[in-house]
Image (tube, rainbow, N blue to C red):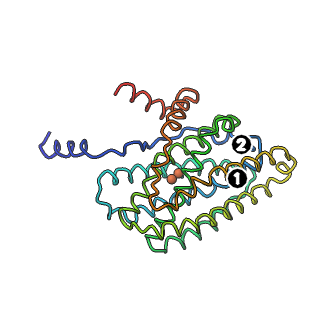
Amino acid sequence: MSLANVNVEKNYLNRPKALGITVRRLQFNPKKIKRHYFANSPFMSHLLTALSSTFPIGEQFFVNSVRNVRDKVTDPKLQAQIAAFIGQEAMHSKAHTEFNDAWRRDDYQLDRFQAWLAKQDDTLRKAHPKLQLALTCAFEHFTAMLGGYILKHPEILSTLDEDAMKLWVWHAIEEIEHRSVAFDVYQEVYGDDRIRRLLMRSVTTGFASLTFYATSRLIWQDKWKSIPKLGGNLFGVYLVSKMLLQLIPEYLSYYQADFHPAKHDYTKLVNYWKARMADEYGMISFQEETASKIYS
Ligand SMILES: [Fe+2]
Ligand SMILES: [Fe+2]
C-alpha cells in the first residue's frame, strides 16, 4: 500500500463522527398497513397520512436549505452531523414515498395535492437561503416535538399494526436525534434570532392550515368509511386536542432567547424505543446498534 493511500485511510478514520445521529434503513411493508391504522380512528390515521404526504417534498426542502449553506460551516463535527442529517432525511423521504404509494394504490388521490405542494416548494426555494434555513429550523422543532410526543405515549402506539409502528417510531427517533442540526447550522452561519423566531410564527400558521387542509381532503375521499366511525373520530379529536395543549410549553420554548433543541432531553425515551424496536419488532438496524454497544 502506498503512503498516500495510508494517509487517506488515516484521515478517514480521524474524521469526526456524527455522534448520536445514525442513518438507518427501514424495512417495512406499507401494503400491510390497514386503512385506519392509528388508534382505530379515521381522523387520526388521515392526519398522519396527510403529514406523510407532505414529507417527501418537505424533507427534501429541509435537506436543500442546509446544503445551501453547508460550505460556510467550519466546524468539522457539525459537518459530520450535516451528512448524517441528510442521510436520515433522504431515508425518510424514501420510506414515506413507499407509504404514500401504498395509499395511492388504495383509492386515495394524493397527486393534485402533491403537485400543489411542489409549486409552493419551488417558490420557497427562491427565497433567501437564510429564510429557507430558518423555516427548516422551525419545522424541525415541530417534528422533534411531535416525535417526542408520540414516543411518550406507548398506549396509543400499541394500537398501530406492526408496519405502521416501524415507520412512525423509526421516523420519530431519528427526528429527535437530528433535531439540533439545522439549528446549529443556522446559529453558526446567521445567528439571527429575530428572523428565527419570526419565521416560527409563519410556520405555525402555515403548518396548521396545511395539515388541516390535507387531512380534510383524505377524510372527504374516504367519507363513507370514515364518517360513520364516530367513536374513533371523537377519540382522535380528543387525542389531538390533548396533545396540542400539552405541547404548548415545549412549543413556546422556541421563542426564548437561549433556546436550543438539545435542551429538551429525550435520551431515556429514545433508548427505550430503540431497545423495543430491536427486541420486539426485530428491526435489524436497531439490533445492530444494540449489539455494537454491547461489544464496544
Ligand atoms: Fe424526517
Ligand atoms: Fe427532520
Q: Count the marks: how many?
A: 2
Tag 2 secondary structure? loop
Left or right of residue 164, residue 194 in this image: left
Q: Position of residue 200 (x, y in %)?
A: 55, 65
Q: Is residue 218 above or below residue 120?
A: above
Q: Is residue 23 above or below residue 130?
A: above
Reading the chain from its start, which is encountered first: label 2 or label 1? 2
The reply to whether the residue tagged 2 has its Cβ within 8 angstroms of ligand 1 is: no
Residue lying at 34% horizontally and 28% vertically, measured from the top left: 296
Which label number is shown at residue 30? none
Left or right of residue 27, residue 78 in this image: left
Q: Position of residue 90 (x, y in %)?
A: 48, 52
Q: Amino acid at mark 2?
A: Phe
Q: Position of residue 147 (x, y in %)?
A: 57, 46
Q: Nearer the viewer, residue 15 or 138?
A: 138
Residue lying at 64% horizontally and 35% vertically, measured from the top left: 154
Residue holding disc 1? 47
**Is the residue marked by circle 2 packed among few (<14), some (14-19), or many (20+) residues within 10 Å?**
many
Q: Position of residue 104 (x, y in %)?
A: 69, 52
Look at the image and tell me in which quarter the N terminus lies.
top left
Tag 1 secondary structure? helix
Which label number is shown at residue 38? 2
Residue 279: quadrant of the picture: top right
Residue lying at 44% horizontally and 58% vertically, measured from the top left: 258
Cα separation between marks 2 and 1: 9 Å
**Contact? badges 2 and 1 (CB < 8 Å):** yes
Q: Amino acid at mark 1?
A: Leu
